[in-house]
Image (cartoon, rainbow, N blue to C red):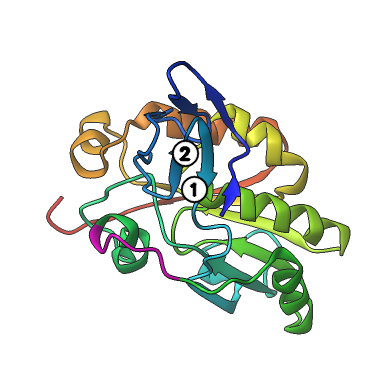
Amino acid sequence: MKEAYLYERVKDETVRCLLCSHRCLIRSGDRGMCNVRENRAATLFTLVYDKIIARNADPIEKKPIYHFLPGTRSYSIATPGCNFKCTFCQNADISQMPSDLKEILGEPIPPEQIVQDALATGCATISYTYTEPTVYFELALDTAVLATSKGLKNVFVTNGYMTRECLERIHPHLHAANVDLKAFRDEFYKKQCRAKLGPVLESIQTMKEMGIWVEVTTLLIPGL
């Protein structure tokens, strides 16, 4: 467990998380919508800093990223948790684990080991993927800073719901991102993801302005 990086104390031991565009107000003893950030007596903690649930060396095209270091491999990691509640999620067993199973499983693998494993497997990048990297921001940022110092690039595979504060903090060490644009209707985002379209579009534009290489995936979902 580690203290969160982006939050502010409001009043009466309530905090506001500044990591994603839900900007959850969290009372002491409660968690945000992602269920992996918990307020303990006016201090917000991440519950997944040492909970790696998936890791693998993948072709970068599998992310999918096709125009950033094509033909290379990307060391890919994830922790449980997500700030969306997509009805069609293909990784719900790990992304919704904290909500559905009421537990958070994973291996305690520190940033130093992640970077070492990426180098040992001949990867050119580390991808923060499979679930939503925004909700394990502390682990992603600490790993990305170290990875950059070792000559590796960093990639987010994301729903794009992070705040500008989040992007400003990580962008010197974030080199590419694939944003999963679920649909182009706010109604769809509200009904199927419990989110909004606007912040996703803003993040895409902000990342582009910051010089981050951006690719967008649009979904074809049978029946929706």
Placement of 170 over or under 36, stated as above or below: above
Q: Residue at x 70, y 74 (%)?
A: 72
Give the percent coordinates (x, y) of residue 131: 44, 59
Residue sitting at 28 percent across and 59 percent down?
102
Direction bottom: furthest residue: 121
Label 2, on which residue?
40
Q: How far apart in space, not on screen, are marks 2 and 1 (Cα)?
A: 17 Å
Taken as a whole, is the magenta stretch helix, strand or loop? loop
213 on left or right of 62 = right
- The three-letter code of the residue at mark 2 reads Arg
Task: Please give the range of residues in magenta.
Answer: 100-105
The answer to whether residue 151 is left or right of residue 178 is: right
Mark 1, secondary structure of its residue: helix
Residue 10 x/y as whole percent: 48, 17
First reached walking from the N terminus: tag 2 or tag 1: 2
Q: Residue 129 location in percent, x, y? A: 52, 61
